[in-house]
Image: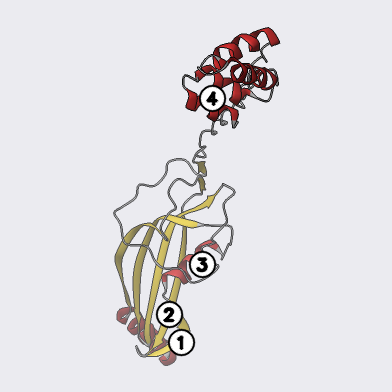
Amino acid sequence: MKHLMIFSFVTALVAGASGCNHSAVEIRESYIPMEDGRPHKMSYRRTGEACTYRLFGFIPMGGSTRVDAAVSKMTRNSEKIDNILALHVENKWSFWVLGTTNCTVVSGYPVIYVDDKPKRGVFSRRMVYGPAGGGVAAPSTPMRETPPVVAPAPRPAPTPTPAIAPTPRPTPRAATPTKAECEKKCARFASIWKGSDAIQGTIRRNCIKKCVKPERKAYRNCIDAASSIEDIGKCNNL
């Protein structure tokens, strides 16, 4: 009977000296910043908790109160989860006769990106916590899927029409004058000489010999333009 009274007294002491305190810390829009424009699926809200214990209030007994430790327990370290939306972070303290318990409780909506871009993975390395944000309303439908953002297919560039180079027209070759035409040209050219008929005849005969040759175009142009005795010497030198 005496031992029963002592046990009842200790039990009452522990119950009377223990207690707990809840304190909401923050509500974040996401665990890490979301990547804008990426289609994703969102799951139902999940909860995780990580605690640390101290004997007599100052001797640590293991555990962790980090937010990432609580999130890891909430998602079981799944590498498939890319982020947590509407993350609620809450600290909870419990006091008992021989020490204290400090817990971090988190809850949120896991999301998975559903496109072909590289996966970052929330738990592949220690992540940087996103900024605290305002409250985020809980989704009414679990596992709803955001439709993929599909960029319009680019229009194919018009095939340039190859430029068709105009067919060069052959330069018409100046027709070689006939002998009769050359005789007429050379008669006028020889008449520029006002001296003896013999010299004039020699000029005309030499002129005809050159005039009928196709390659002597420059000569023919010269005798057509000649008008003085100086022109006779110039043309004969061609």
SS at mark 1 in the image: strand
Secondary structure beneath dot 2 equals: strand
Mark 4: amino acid: Ile
Q: Quadrant of the N terminus?
A: bottom left
Earlier-in-chain disc, 4 versus 3: 3
Q: CA distance from mark 1 to mark 3?
A: 20 Å
For numbered disc 4, what is the local secondary structure? helix
What residue is disc 1 on? 61
Report which residue position mark 4 lands on. Answer: 232
In which image quadrant can residue 130 be found? bottom left
Q: Position of residue 105 (x, y in %)?
A: 40, 66
Q: Residue 218 at what x, y percent from top left? A: 59, 26
Crowding around mark 4 (Cα neighbors within 10 Å: few <14, some 14 to 19, many 20+) is some
In the image, which disc is placed on residue 72? 3
Q: Quadrant of the C terminus?
A: top right
When the figure is inspected, residue 115 is found, relative to residue 214, above or below; the finding is below
Residue 197 percent coordinates (x, y):
59, 15
Sequence-first disc among 1 and 3? 1
Identify which amino acid the numbered label 3 is placed on: Ser
Q: Nearer the viewer, residue 151 or 2?
A: 151
Question: Mark 1 or mark 4, which is nearer the start of the sequence?
Answer: 1
Q: Nearer the viewer, mark 1 or mark 3?
A: 3
Q: Residues within 10 Å of mark 3 (few under 14, many from 20)?
A: some
* SS at badge 3: helix
